[in-house]
Image: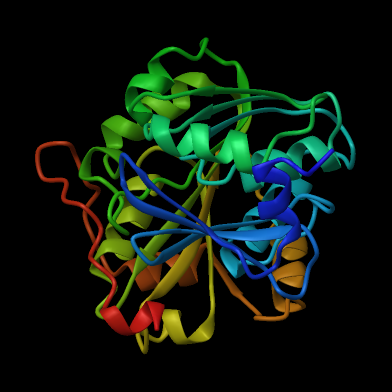
């Protein structure tokens, strides 16, 4: 019997999968260096990388940093209850399922067509306890029980920009409602010179959480280039020393700022509310070349 069309796609390294989804044109590009690994792009912007044979492998630097946060939220191997705002190729949900079996996860991904594509071409492990809802992130948060989550991860982009309504104190109030006492919030942020958006997001998190830390590479911190920053917040002490060690030893080292140095960086920026929120800035075209 011949192979199915989907099996041929996964085994033929030269064959990409291209399909229109709600958010634009999705491309699944095979990784030439890893047998069953794929990169998801939306309108040319890289979104996720997945290795079906090794879901604990995280290729993108910001996802590696979020992986460190996941590793440090609780003792190694302990199951977690996690809410993912933004699904992409479900990379981080797969990572949690692989590294912390019996975890229960809820993914909120508005793009229903993207969810269907990912489920079909990059199927989840049958034992993974992952539920996906195709609704807006704030609407999805409203459906999560109060104090349910150990961890909420926000990685939501529309046209390479974080929507305005996911940048405010009111949004973080919705996040706090679903976090258990002592729970952790983590967000993938993107900004470039003069880092106005990043400063505002740090101030916003600081208005709602007792502890805030941010990881980015030196070029982003110095305002030399557009890039990602991972923000981590909680009402309990953050594992800053271990996070710093892990991020510094990554292939693309990241620097962790926390406490006074982070407050100094914020420079008196005001917390963002729904009334004044704007989407994150668009990356320059050179970012994806």
Q: Quadrant of residue 68?
A: bottom right
Q: Position of residue 274 (x, y in %)?
A: 17, 36
Q: Residue at x 66, y 38 (%)?
A: 93
Residue 237 left/right relative to 260:
right
Quarter that holds the C terminus: bottom left
Which residue is outermost to the left? 275
Q: Nearer the viewer, residue 147 or 14?
A: 14
Quarter that holds the N terminus: top right
Q: Position of residue 155 (x, y in %)?
A: 46, 47
Residue 274 left/right relative to 211:
left
Q: Residue at x 36, y 78 (%)?
A: 226
Question: Eyeballing the image, is 289 above or below 269?
Answer: below
Residue 79 left/right relative to 145:
right
Residue 239 in sight here: no
Q: Position of residue 161 (x, y in %)?
A: 28, 56
Q: Nearer the viewer, residue 257 or 95?
A: 95
Q: Describe the colour scheme in one phrase.
A: rainbow
Q: Residue at x 86, y 31 (%)?
A: 101
Q: Position of residue 118 (x, y in %)?
A: 56, 40
Which residue is outermost to the front? 1
Q: Quadrant of residue 153?
A: top right
Q: Residue at x 29, y 37 (%)?
A: 169
Q: Nearer the viewer, residue 208 or 145?
A: 145
Residue 4 in sight here: yes
Q: How many marks?
A: 0
Q: Quadrant of residue 223?
A: bottom left
């Amino acid at each position: 019997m011949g192979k199915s069309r989907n099996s041929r796609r996964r085994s033929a390294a030269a064959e990409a999968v291209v399909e229109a989804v709600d958010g634009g044109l999705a491309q699944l590009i095979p990784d030439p260096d890893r047998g069953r690994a794929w990169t998801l792009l939306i309108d040319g912007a890289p979104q996720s990388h997945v290795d079906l044979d090794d879901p604990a492998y995280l290729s993108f630097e910001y996802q590696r940093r979020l992986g460190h946060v996941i590793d440090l939220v609780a003792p190694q191997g302990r199951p977690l209850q996690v809410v993912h705002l933004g699904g992409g190729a479900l990379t981080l949900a797969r990572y949690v399922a692989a590294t912390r079996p019996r975890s229960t996860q809820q993914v909120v991904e508005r793009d229903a067509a993207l969810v269907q594509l990912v489920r079909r071409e990059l199927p989840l492990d049958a034992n993974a306890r992952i539920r996906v809802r195709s609704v807006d992130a704030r609407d999805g948060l409203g459906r999560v029980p109060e104090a349910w989550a150990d961890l909420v991860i926000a990685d939501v982009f529309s046209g390479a920009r974080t929507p305005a309504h996911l940048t405010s104190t009111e949004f973080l109030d919705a996040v706090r409602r679903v976090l258990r006492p002592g729970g952790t919030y983590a967000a993938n942020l993107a900004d470039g010179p003069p880092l106005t958006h990043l400063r505002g997001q740090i101030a916003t998190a600081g208005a709602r959480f007792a502890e805030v830390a941010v990881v980015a590479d030196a070029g982003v911190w110095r305002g030399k280039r557009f890039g990602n920053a991972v923000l981590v917040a909680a009402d309990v002490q953050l594992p800053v020393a271990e996070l710093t060690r892990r991020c510094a030893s990554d292939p693309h080292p990241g620097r962790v700022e926390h406490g006074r140095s982070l407050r100094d960086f914020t420079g008196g920026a005001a917390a963002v509310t729904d009334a004044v929120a704007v989407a994150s800035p668009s990356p320059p075209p050179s970012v994806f070349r």
